[in-house]
Structure formats: C-alpha cells, structure tokens
Image (spheres, helix red, strand yellow):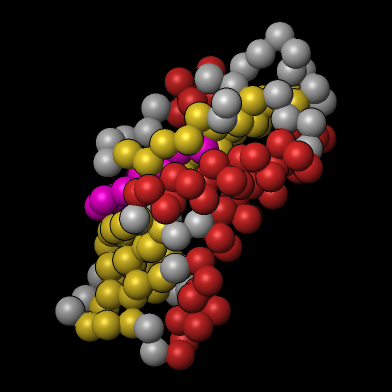
Amino acid sequence: MPVIHLTDQPLDYTAITESVRDPAAGAVVLFLGTVREFTAGQQTEHLEYEAYREMAESSLKQLADEASARFPIVKTAIVHRLGVLQLSDVAVAIAVSTPHRAQAFTAGQWLIDTLKQRVPIWKREHYTDGRVLWQHPVAVADSAAGQSEAT
C-alpha cells in the first residue's frame, strides 16, 4: 500500500524516505517541492495550499496505483502539505523505491509531473507587491487569462 497523506504540519522527509526503503529495492529517490522566492519574475511572500481532502487523497491513491502499473515500484509515498507555507518550506514529498536507479528517477519525475496536472490541490501565491494569484494544475496555463485577484 502506498503512503498517501495530506497534512497541515511540516513534512518529515526523513520518515517519508524511510517508509519506502525495502530490501527488494536497490534505489530510493526522494523529490521535495519547496516554496521558492521568485515565480515568473514575481517575488513570493508566502503560499497557501488548499484541497478537498477526500478527493485529493483519492486522486493521489489513483496516481500511485497508476505509477505502480507503469514502473517497477516497490514502494511509494506521496505527502502534500496544506495551509500557509513560507519560503523554503517543503510543500510536497514524493519517495519511490525500485530495483534500479533509472527506474526510480523516471517514476519519481512522472509522479510529480502528473500530480501537478491531475490532483485537485490549489495554490494561492501571495506576492510581496500585495497581489494574490490562485493556481490549480489545470489552470496554470490559463492564469494569464485573468485568474488573479487583488488583496
């Protein structure tokens, strides 16, 4: 069973990594998505993440199941933080173990790329100039079409 979790607490990425270690796996890859200071030239003050928990957790489970069907994954963990996050905070951790390293890197990249496209987790970016921008993975391409709001 994959580890799937949404939390309001800081992520313990050491524990997340350890949760996928297994004698059958020769490789473990951990991806950490962190809050960066600049996005498209705009200085970030902080981020907020929101989700309809049951739907997002179900989507994450489906994602983990699909990854296991595509790649020789031994174990998977996907943990996403919700709430207000400051610069450098870890927003998402994805850990996978596979028999060999190339498989682990490929599976980990597929998981984060697909999570950002499919999972209903919304990000609200607060910029230092006072602007606020809501983003959802599907809507990122549409953000220039007026999905921002001023505070």
- Kindly tell me whether residue 91 is visible in this rendering: no
Image quadrant in which you'd find residue 70: top right
- In this picture, residue 148 sits left or right of residue 138: left
Point out the residue furthest to the bottom here: 145
- In this picture, residue 75 sits left or right of residue 36: right
Q: How many marks?
A: 0
Vertical comparison of 88 with 15: above or below: below
- In this picture, residue 35 sits left or right of residue 151: right
Image quadrant in which you'd find residue 100: top right
Magenta stretch secondary structure, dominant? strand
Write the residue at 32% across / 66% down: 124
Write the residue at 26% across / 51% down: 83
Write the residue at 32% across / 39% down: 7
Vertical comparison of 50 with 41: above or below: above
Residue 10: % across, % down: 31, 35
Residue 39: % across, % down: 45, 68
Does the magenta segment cover residue 41? no
Does the magenta segment cover residue 82? yes
Residue 40: % across, % down: 48, 73
Q: From the image, which quarter does the N terminus lie in?
A: top right
- Kindly tell me whether residue 65 is visible in this rendering: yes
- In this picture, residue 5 sits left or right of residue 69: left
What residue range appears in magenta?
78-89
Q: From the image, which quarter does the C terminus lie in?
A: bottom left
Q: Nearer the viewer, residue 85 or 147?
A: 147
Point out the residue furthest to the top here: 23
Write the residue at 54% across / 41% down: 61
Residue 62: % across, % down: 59, 46
